[in-house]
Image (tube, rainbow, N blue to C red):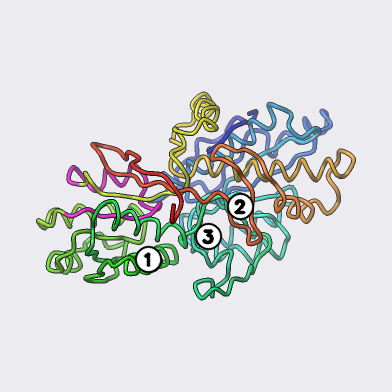
């Protein structure tokens, strides 16, 4: 999560609205012309409505804050940054439509998002064909950067336009396994996932490390996250002898799943990845969720000296929603685009070149700066070089951090 300021949000995101445009992002072109500024739009794609909107709105607001801060500081001389946020409702088809819409707007020189790896899969080629840089603050599926055969050691970067500031499930799943086995002392796990790109992938990387450490997978199953009635798999968990459940998926289903497991008399913790790390999970899981665990990318933003300004500026900006799990990463994603625009302008005598998208894309690969979440830079695959993760535990009505580190560290 990160810092910067000048655009006031024109709409408080009415229910069902697909687009939020920062003040002046379209109607103030005359003012931009009068001031001599060039408008650069940073697109944002995230679930702004629906079950995952708590995370999506934090992504949108944090990217918006970065644009405001850049404008307030006049960070790129002659450039005014605007935000155009589109709602993908956590659906791949909506994400692809949004990608096409953003590509069609020539003022869009970079995109922050999406939240879901499955949505990103539908967007990557659209952006890559247009040489439009995409930086996700939340996608963790390794295949997005390293190709479908990454698990075998055959890593191939399919789309050079794709980057992320979050680390991947190739690290997150094993990190959780190490903590659960070595620190929490859990040796028998029942494995559940929602069969989606993110959930199934995360569960798979957890399983590989947990069994390697000597842990036992005493049962496996899948759920339909839309059903909310998980009685069948809860019965299996109860009879399995598991001392923990690992769930690959997101909080709208994970919370009720945990609640139903505890209600069955099986008082064992549920652990999941960053997809469950939100206060909404605690609300959905209820009072018996105490002791449930989640891993999430990075260190707790409130604990980072580098994030103090971001937290203060976010509060000062008056956003209605919290920055949530990916706020810092969203700010840093937007700021990486801003840095790339600055590098492009500086290399072209203070102006954007005709092929600005391609130049900005090239510049993103080389960005390196101290962001809200730490050092921000990208490796040869477009992955974040920052590999830190944190384990959180439910205590009372919220999550509390219990351990931070890197996989193997």
| Image position of 47 with respect to 320: above or below | below
Contact check, label 1 and label 2, Cβ < 8 Å: no
Q: Which mark is residue 42?
A: none
Q: Residue at x 40, y 51 (%)?
A: 274
Image coordinates of residue 169 in percent, x first then y, are 45, 60
Q: Is residue 275 magenta?
A: yes
What is the span of residues highlighted in magenta in the rendered image? 268-288
Mark 1 vs mark 2: give the one in front: 1
Distance in Å between CA atoms under marks 1 and 2: 28 Å
* Disc 3 from disc 2: Cα separation: 18 Å
Q: Is the residue marked by circle 1 packed among few (<14), some (14-19), or many (20+) residues within 10 Å?
A: some
The residue that mark 2 highlights is: 135
Q: What residue lies at 42% left-to-right and 67% top-to-bottom? A: 201
Q: Position of residue 123 (x, y in %)?
A: 59, 62
Front in this rendered view, residue 105 or 213: 213
Residue wearing tag 1: 209
Instruction: Answer with the quarter of the image where residue 216 lies.
Output: bottom left
27 displayed left or right of 11: right
**Left-right relation of 173 to 37:** left
**Front: mark 3 or 1:** 1
Residue in the image at 48% along x and 41% along y: 58
Label 2 sits on a secondary structure element that is strand
Identify which residue, 15 or 110, lies in the foreground.
Answer: 110
Label 3 and label 1: CA atoms lie apart by: 35 Å
Residue 340, how many percent across, how many down? 73, 45
Which of marks 2 and 1 precedes in the sequence? Answer: 2
User: Helix, strand or loop at disc 1?
Assistant: helix
Residue 184 shown left or right of residue 37 in the figure: left
> On the image, numbered disc 3 is attached to which residue?
94
């Amino acid at each position: 999560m990160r810092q910067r300021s000048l655009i006031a949000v024109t709409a408080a995101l009415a229910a069902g609205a697909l687009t939020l445009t920062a003040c002046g992002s379209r109607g103030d072109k005359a003012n931009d012309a009068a001031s001599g500024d060039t408008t650069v739009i940073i697109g944002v794609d995230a679930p702004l409505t629906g079950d995952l909107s708590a995370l999506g709105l934090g992504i949108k607001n944090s990217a918006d804050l970065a644009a405001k801060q850049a404008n307030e500081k006049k960070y790129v001389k002659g450039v005014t940054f605007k935000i155009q946020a589109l709602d993908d409702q956590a659906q791949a088809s909506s994400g692809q439509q949004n990608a096409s819409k953003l590509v069609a707007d020539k003022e869009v020189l970079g995109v922050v998002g999406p939240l879901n790896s499955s949505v990103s899969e539908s967007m990557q080629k659209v952006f890559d064909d247009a040489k439009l840089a995409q930086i996700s603050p939340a996608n963790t599926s390794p295949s997005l950067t390293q190709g479908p055969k990454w698990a075998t050691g055959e890593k191939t970067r399919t789309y050079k336009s794709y980057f992320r500031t979050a680390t991947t499930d190739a690290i997150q799943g094993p990190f959780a396994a190490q903590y659960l086995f070595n620190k929490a002392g859990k040796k028998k796990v029942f494995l559940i996932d929602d069969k989606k790109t993110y959930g199934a992938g995360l569960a798979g990387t957890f399983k590989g490390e947990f069994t390697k450490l000597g842990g036992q997978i005493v049962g496996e199953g899948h759920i339909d996250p839309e059903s909310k009635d998980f009685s069948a798999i809860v019965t299996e968990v109860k009879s399995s002898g598991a001392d923990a459940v690992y769930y690959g998926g997101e909080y709208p289903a994970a919370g009720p799943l945990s609640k139903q497991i505890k209600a069955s008399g099986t008082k064992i913790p549920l652990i999941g990845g960053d997809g469950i790390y939100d206060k909404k999970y605690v609300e959905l899981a209820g009072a018996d969720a105490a002791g449930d665990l989640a891993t999430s990318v990075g260190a707790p933003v409130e604990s980072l000296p580098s994030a103090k300004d971001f937290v203060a500026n976010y509060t000062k900006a008056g956003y209605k929603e919290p920055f949530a799990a990916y706020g810092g990463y969203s700010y840093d994603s937007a700021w990486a685009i801003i840095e790339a625009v600055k590098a492009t302008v500086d290399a072209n005598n203070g102006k954007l070149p005709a092929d600005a998208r391609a130049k900005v894309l090239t510049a993103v690969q080389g960005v390196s700066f101290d962001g809200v979440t730490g050092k921000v830079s990208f490796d040869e695959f477009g992955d974040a070089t920052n590999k830190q993760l944190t384990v959180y535990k439910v205590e009372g009505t919220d999550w509390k951090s219990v351990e931070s580190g890197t996989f193997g560290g």
